Image (cartoon, grey):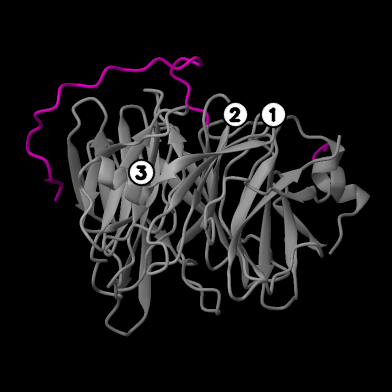
Amino acid sequence: MQISKSVKMLSSLLVVCSIVACSDKAPLEAVPVDTGSTVIDAKYIDIKDAHFKPPVFTEIELDIGVPAAAVWGATGRDNDGRIYFGLSTYKGIHDTAFLAQYDPATGISTAQSDTLTQLKRARLYVDGMSQNKLHSKFFMAEDGYLYFSSFDETGETSTRNPIYGGNLWRKLPDDENWEHLLASDEALIAVNVHGRYVYALGYWDHVLYQYDTITQRSTKLSIGSVPGHISRNFLVNRKGHVFVPRVEQLANGESSTVLVEISPSMAISDLHPMNDYLNKGNFGSHGIVAYTNMKNGDAYFIAASGGLYHIVETATGGHELKYLGKFEGQYENSYIASLFSPDGESLLVGLGRNQETDGYFWYIRELSTQVTVNYPVDTIPKKDYLLYGSITTDDEGNMYIVGRDARNRSRHRPVIIKASYTQ
């Protein structure tokens, strides 16, 4: 359905086990960040009439000369507004993954090395090693470093970890070289940060790692997941509480999902039931596929099922998980590739697809009424473009949506789309 003028303006408009018992490393020296203790993961702008229509979609070409195949949701920004993309490849072909920095102000893109080069530099490389996925998002922590993770896919099955596991990295924005922080048996697919702590989620079994940037020590906690399932994302709120889904198989063959809440001490503090999580269609069960943080500390996220959830901080300091139904009720079996809140208060927007239609749709949800509307996007072909989650915005409020372009069947390439609102 289209947006009517009346809708347009709506309301006026876990046992914790230490994997590093001790460390010979000296504590890190904190690197000052120009913005103080603020970690910027999204830039909010005022709502205008244009936000009630689809944005302008522009493809960005990264002129860095690397043989990448896709950007699987691996985006992020630093506090100066520069955008980062993790460029994955296919195992057995290149076996490495590349990092690119993009400056929206100048349009200049810069290559910032790759996983195998950095593993060799850290003297961790062995012959035949693969680390072809930079899949996590990039977060700039309070120490001024960007944190992210990589992983291998060689030899993995639904119950066996990949041969070369995963790695946690950090780098300064203008430094081509990376610092290796942690190696894991699990593939580290997602990263998040809060204060001194960096978190990484690995598969299988939804293993959560916490890395302390001050002590350089790590702990891990197995949250639990059925064989073969991994959530593409997890959340950390402004209180430093981590939210990771746990999927269990019941005796009757059905599955049960709860959102596990973990405190900064890596103890399970609460369990929140989730009744709409696994995708029963043919888009795959990717867990939490998109999320966005709000100005007041709340968070919204969408599961692969299309179910929309709201994490609310209660008056007593706890948290409540509210299920708000399908993000898009008209097309119930929708996969929402990205989620943004332009102002961090009143609107949720995103790009999605569904089984009933041929192309992508731009979704707009007004939070005071919970009314969702959609517009078809004819310029983005669903058949050839596979787009994954992003939460990244630049200083002008432009949103970045990424994935794979499969129009050339012999050589897939990354697709990066900038979504901009007209002035």
Asked if residue 411 is positioned above or below residue 16 in the image, the reply reads: below
Pick whichever of labels 3 and 2 is earlier in the sequence: 2
Q: Badges 3 and 1: C-beta atoms under 8 Å apart?
A: no
Residue 242, numbered label: 3
Q: Secondary structure at mark 2?
A: loop
Question: Which residue is at 48% across, 22% downward?
Answer: 38
Q: Badges 2 and 1: C-beta atoms under 8 Å apart?
A: yes
Q: Dot 3: within a 10 Å radius of its alpha carbon, few (fewer than 14), some, or many (20 or more) residues?
A: many
Question: Which residue is at 24% across, 40% downward?
Answer: 122
Which of 238 and 144 lies nearest the eye of the viewer? 144
Which of 187 and 282 lies nearest the eye of the viewer? 187
Q: Which residue is mark 1?
A: 105
User: Does the stretch in magenta take in 29?
Assistant: yes
Which of 330 and 179 lies nearest the eye of the viewer? 179
Q: Position of residue 299 (x, y in %)?
A: 52, 43
Image quarter (top left, top right, bottom left or bottom right) of the N terminus: bottom right
Pick whichever of labels 2 and 1 is earlier in the sequence: 2
Q: Is residue 26 left or right of residue 317?
A: left
The magenta-colored residue range is 11-40
Figure label count = 3
Q: Which residue is mark 2?
A: 81
